[in-house]
Image (cartoon, grey):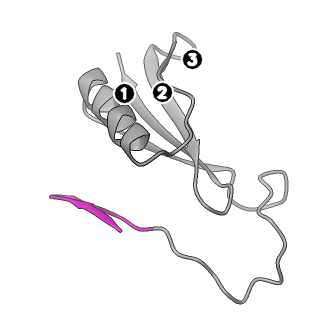
Amino acid sequence: MWYQPGLVFGLHTNVSNQGEAFSETRTGLDHVSLKVASRSDLEAWTVWLDELDVTHTGIRHLEEPFVYSTVVLRDPDGIQLELFASG
């Protein structure tokens, strides 16, 4: 569990699963996207993820459908998590 004032983010394991892996192609959750306040916050997240040895895409800058920067990673179940900063 990670906590910052105003935000609680927890990942949990469901032990009743029959062993099948998550698939974003099945009906249900595709991914979770969380906005951070600024590009510098996004850079701080990548440093922290690197310190934890979490695999991620690094910061990618995109201009469609709007201007934003993003970092994509996966949780322990393979669910895609995206952090993004607009502008």
- First in sequence: mark 1 or mark 3? 3
Residue visible at 56% across and 42% down?
73
Quarter of the image where the C terminus is located: top left
In the image, residue 21 above or below residue 74: below
38 drawn magenta: no
At label 1, counting other C-alpha atoms closer than 10 Å, the crowd grade (few under 14, some 14-19, many 20 or more) is some
In the image, residue 27 above or below residue 45: below
Q: Give the amino acid type for the residue marked by disc 3 in the picture.
A: Pro
Pointers 1 and 2 in contact (CB under 8 A)? yes
Q: Which residue is mark 1?
A: 85
In the current view of this chain or complex, which residue is farthest to the left? Answer: 5
At label 3, counting other C-alpha atoms closer than 10 Å, the crowd grade (few under 14, some 14-19, many 20 or more) is few
Q: Which residue is mark 2?
A: 70
Residue visible at 34% across and 30% down?
42
Q: Nearer the viewer, mark 3 or mark 2?
A: 2
In the image, residue 38 above or below residue 34: above
Q: Give the amino acid type for the residue marked by disc 2 in the picture.
A: Thr
Say what secondary structure mark 1 lies in. Answer: strand
Residue 65: mark: 3
Question: Is 44 placed left or right of 54 in the picture?
Answer: left
Q: Give the amino acid type for the residue marked by disc 1 in the picture.
A: Ala
Say what secondary structure mark 3 lies in. Answer: loop
Spot occupied by residue 6 in the image (x, y as percentages of width and height)? 18, 58
Question: 16 or 65: nearer the eye?
Answer: 16
**Which segment is the magenta one?**
1-10
Spot occupied by residue 54 in the image (x, y as percentages of width and height)? 51, 45
